[in-house]
Amino acid sequence: MTTGTAAPALRLGDEAPDFTAETTEGTIRFHEWLGGGWGVLFSHPRDFTPVCTTELGEMARIRSEFDRRGVKVLGLSVDPLDAHERWARDIEETQGYAPNFPLVADPQREVADLYGMVHPNADDTATVRSVFVVGPDKKIKLTLTYPMSTGRNFEEILRVIDSLQLTAAHRVSTPANWRQGDDVIIVPAVDDDEARRRFPDGWAAPKPYLRIVPQPR
């Protein structure tokens, strides 16, 4: 992997860059590690920092929710492996859960630079709180960037994954504040004839472009 020039900003629909890296669970090649499933790659500014400590403990606590959705989880910071391993003990002591997913050691910032996780306007040595959700096709489906001072809302990440997986399987989209089981919207690309075939029980249409149906199962 080469570094030294800034990678272009990654956009939704771009292929998630592949990389090989050392992690707390051994060497991985990202695309191979993902296999044919979904993945979340999320970065942390530094080991032994307070907000990150709470985040990794929370991710470990709810890891089963990602497993249930078939989503692999991979963390990253620019610290070396031995720091990750020492920090894990602090996380377990203070949060009640040790990291139960691999953490990339990226001291040369190769992966961080590849994914644009280092923002010089915030800190030119540490990563911001970036989140990338990657689909089975290795394309980026979601990007989120939080400031270093603000911990992530993991419930929101799960909510978006639920929406992404639902809309990948059915020709629907999800409205504001949607949660599992709520009504959904038929996408505009589906005309009424196709919609009748897909949704034979019909739909509510307060406007012709707003066709609301129960969530497909």
Image: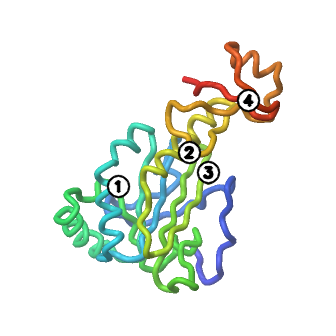
First-in-chain label (2 vs 3): 3
CA distance separating discs 4 and 2: 17 Å
Label 4's element? strand
Mark 2 nearby-residue class (10 Å; few <14, some 14–19, many ≥20) = few
CA distance separating discs 2 and 3: 18 Å
The amino acid sitting under disc 2 is: Asn
**Looking at the image, which residue is at 48% across and 51% down?**
156
Circle 3 is placed at which residue position?
Answer: 141
Label 1's element? helix
Q: Position of residue 78 (x, y in %)?
A: 42, 76
Which image quadrant is residue 74 in? bottom left
Q: Position of residue 192 (x, y in %)?
A: 82, 22
CA distance separating discs 2 and 1: 22 Å
First-in-chain label (4 vs 2): 2
The amino acid sitting under disc 4 is: Arg
Circle 4 is placed at which residue position?
Answer: 211
First-in-chain label (2 vs 1): 1
| Front of the two marks 2 and 3 | 2
- CB under 8 Å between discs 4 and 2: no
Label 3's element? strand
Circle 2 is placed at which residue position?
Answer: 177
The amino acid sitting under disc 1 is: Met
| Front of the two marks 3 and 4 | 4
Left-right relation of 22 to 14 = left
Name the foreground residue: 189 vs 26.
Answer: 189
| Front of the two marks 4 and 1 | 4
**Looking at the image, which residue is at 19% across and 66% down?**
94
Which image quadrant is residue 43 in? bottom left
